[in-house]
Structure formats: structure tokens, C-alpha cells
Image: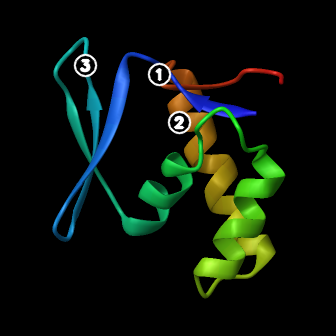
Amino acid sequence: MMALADTVSIKRDEDNFMLFDNISGNIYRLNELSFEILSLCDGKNTGEEILLSITKNFDVTITEAEKDFKRLMQILSEKNYIYDNGN
């Protein structure tokens, strides 16, 4: 199950999507797809469930969604912003 670290939070403000690093104060602008992916990283969804949701809600193929998902997860994992809690 994918989950955001306690040290980060995501917010939506009108048409802006952001990820906040609550430790460093850094703010990262997200696109809508990345925001949706991170919204689903609530500790209850597996990577596969997130991918299925993305393909249903956005006009992307499973191949495109998987590529973007893996890239985003790699970047965020390297920053310790996200993890797989193994449930």
C-alpha cells in the first residue's frame, strides 16, 4: 500500500496543485495527474489500484499511466516523501 510520508502534505488551491515538504519548507508544483496519484497514496491503495483509478479518470493508457507513475514514485521515494507500507 502506497502512502505519503508524514513529513509532506498535498494541497489543491483552485487550479494549482502542490506538494509541501513540512521539514524544509520546500513547495513543489504538481500537475493534476501527479496530484491525483498522490491523493490515492493514502496507505489503503496498492500501486496497481492507483494505476487503474488513473486510467479510469484520465485519458491515458495503462502503459502511459504506468510510466508516469513509476517515474513519480522513483523521484518521491528518493526524497523519502512516499513509501510502500507493505499492508
Q: Which corner quadrant of the image does residue 59 belong to?
A: bottom right
- As helix, strand or loop, the secondary structure at mark 2 comes to helix
- As helix, strand or loop, the secondary structure at mark 1 comes to loop
From the top left corner, tell me how far across and down residue 57 is, in percent.
60, 79
> Neighbour class for label 3 at 10 Å: few (<14), some, many (≥20)?
few
Type of the residue with mark 2: Ile
Residue shown at 16% from the left, 21% from the top: 25
* 3 relative to 76 in the view: left or right: right
Write down the residue under mark 2.
75
Which of pointers 3 and 1 lies earlier in the amino acid sequence?
3
* 56 relative to 5 in the view: left or right: right
Q: CA distance from mark 1 to mark 2?
A: 7 Å
Write down the residue under mark 1.
79
Type of the residue with mark 3: Asn
Name the foreground residue: 33 vs 46: 46
Type of the residue with mark 1: Lys
* 66 relative to 20 in the view: left or right: right
Q: Which mark is residue 22?
A: 3
From the top left corner, tell me how far across and down residue 55 is, in percent.
70, 76
> Neighbour class for label 2 at 10 Å: few (<14), some, many (≥20)?
few
Judged from this view, the residue extending furthest toward the front is 44
Which of pointers 3 and 2 lies earlier in the amino acid sequence?
3
- Residue 43, relative to residue 56: is it above or below? above
Q: CA distance from mark 3 to mark 1?
A: 13 Å
Q: Are marks 1 and 2 in contact (CB under 8 Å)?
A: yes
Judged from this view, the residue extending furthest toward the bottom is 59
- Residue 2, relative to residue 21: is it above or below? below
> Neighbour class for label 1 at 10 Å: few (<14), some, many (≥20)?
few
